[in-house]
Amino acid sequence: MGLKEFKKGLVLSIPVMTGYIPVAIAYAATALSTGLTPWQTIAMSLFVYTGVGQMAAVAMIGQGVSLAGITAAVFIMNLRHVIMSTVVMERMRQTPLGIRVLLSLGITDEVFALETADSSASGSSNAACFAGIALGAWGSWVLGTCLGCGISTMMPPKLMTALSISLYALFISILTPQIRRHLPLITVVLISAAISSLIGSSQGIIIGSLAGAAAGVFLVKEEDLP
């Protein structure tokens, strides 16, 4: 993979980094408050690496939900990654399969939004750029978690709540330039968000995601996809 393209990806990931760090700090504070140790909290960011999934998981741990229930819930919440991975890996079809499988582990909503925003990117050079984006995002999430384990006890609860919503603001800022070109997709997002908000809790996220996927089957055509 090209070093120049990799560096380009790291630069592109800077907005994601600045959004991930405060959210990861909030996640760490939540995880510690439910009884997880700092090492367990950091390990989840290293190996699970899903912002919403980790938040839901630690909330369910605090409620005493079984391991099987937590695993099933997080699995359903992250099913969208299968679709995102398929889209990104198709754009890298000239890249060796082993590299594509490894890079697929770095896909998040924000990384996917950055990657697909450049419709001209393709081939092995795109794999190098994507690697930079993904590594920058993952590294900042782990860094934020480590910071959160160290300073969360010194921060007031209201500030931690404010930090936790920065991820949503980041995602909206990334998607906003695409709104006019992809109105059907925006409609699906609004449907999913509305249902999730009405129901609330972790179940609301799952049901909203499934509802959005069902709406997308009828509303989104192939030419609407980025």
Image (spheres, rainbow, N blue to C red):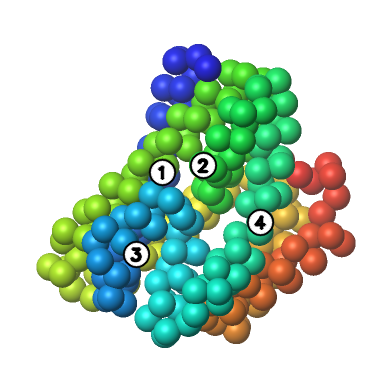
Per the image, label 4 sits on a secondary structure element best described as helix
Separation (CA) of disc 1 from disc 3: 14 Å
Q: Earlier in the sequence, mark 4 or mark 1?
A: 4
Q: Which residue is mark 2?
A: 106
Q: Which mark is residue 27?
A: 3
Q: CA distance from mark 4 to mark 2?
A: 14 Å
Q: Residues within 10 Å of mark 2 (few under 14, many from 20)?
A: many
217 or 34: which is nearer to us? 34
- Helix, strand or loop at label 3? It is helix
Residue at 66 percent across and 46 percent down: it is 84
Measuring from the top left, give residue 41's x and y in whole percent.
31, 61
Q: Which quadrant, please, contains the C terminus? A: top right
Check disc 3 and give the amino acid type.
Answer: Tyr
Q: Is residue 19 above or below residue 74?
A: above
**Residue 87 sits in quarter:** top right
Q: Are marks 1 and 2 in contact (CB under 8 Å)?
A: yes
